[in-house]
Image: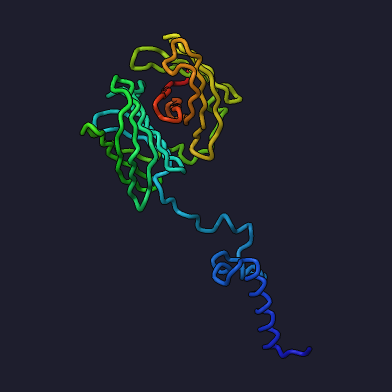
Amino acid sequence: MHMTGTHSLRGLLGVCLMSGLVACGSFANCFNSGFAPAACGGGYRESDASSLPQPAATSAEGRWMGATATGRTVAGLVLDDGSYWLFYTVRANPHILAGLVQGTGTSHSGSFGSSNTRDFNLEGAGTRAATMNGSYVPNKSFQGTIAYFNGDTESFMSTSDADSESAPNLTQVTGTYTGLHTDNHTVTVTVDAAGTISGHSTDGCTFSGTLSPRATGNVFQISMTFQGGACRQGTERLTGVAFYDTATTRLYSAALNHARTTSFLFLGTKQ
């Protein structure tokens, strides 16, 4: 069938648009995805993808380093599932771990809130229930206030850590670490090149476990099993997170049971 130039152009445009619609599912989706122009020979090539604007971070996810208002060092994580793990040291000494604040929170428009906060304290206070509310600027700052059910509060301020965007590096983590607990027992943890963990404490507790990498932030999943005897965890299997701070060569790790009633916390420096 003979068509004029105008009709030919219209026909070609129709074929291109219909091809794009079939692939994208709707006219709006085609233009949102950039598929419709590409169907007719234009648009973005695959090699151009890296130059496209990337989605901006909108949550408090990341690794954070800072301090409390009472002089404790804070090092923590907010993961992509909203769970957070905030390690804190004794006052005025960043080498001795004093506890962990852990829970699951919600990030929205610069505000962060959590109703199931638990503080696993190693200074004699035990496990305390709390809530946490705060604010954040994605990839820049994160601050919050922990409100305990007995009326006490603790606040902290932190900034994004340089390792937040790093990929987990098991080779970097491999080594032996020692850390002093607040009860004056020294804990030694060794991580081998396969991610196998072995450890012991001067109080007689021995344990073993594994590290497996998460997606970003040099963060690892951790699984720990205790050998009973002197271990206050008995023979429980605990799971949690670990991360390595390249600036200080310190390994932070925390593992909990499912009910969050038993914990293992460790802060050690590579030897």
Residue at 33% x, 38% y is 158
Residue at 36% x, 51% y is 108
| Percent of width and height locating residue 167 | 53, 38
| Percent of width and height locating residue 152 | 22, 32
Q: How is the image coloured?
A: rainbow
| Percent of width and height locating residue 175 | 53, 20
Q: Residue furthest left?
A: 151
| Percent of width and height locating residue 182 | 33, 17
The quadrant holding residue 72 is top left
For this view, does 33 lie left or right of residue 98?
right
For this view, does 234 lie left or right of residue 102?
right
Residue at 48% x, 55% y is 55
Q: Nearer the viewer, residue 27 or 46?
A: 27
Q: Residue furthest right?
A: 1
Location of the N terminus (image quadrant): bottom right
Is residue 149 positioned above or below 110 on the image? Answer: above
Residue at 35% x, 12% y is 184
The quadrant holding residue 213 is top right
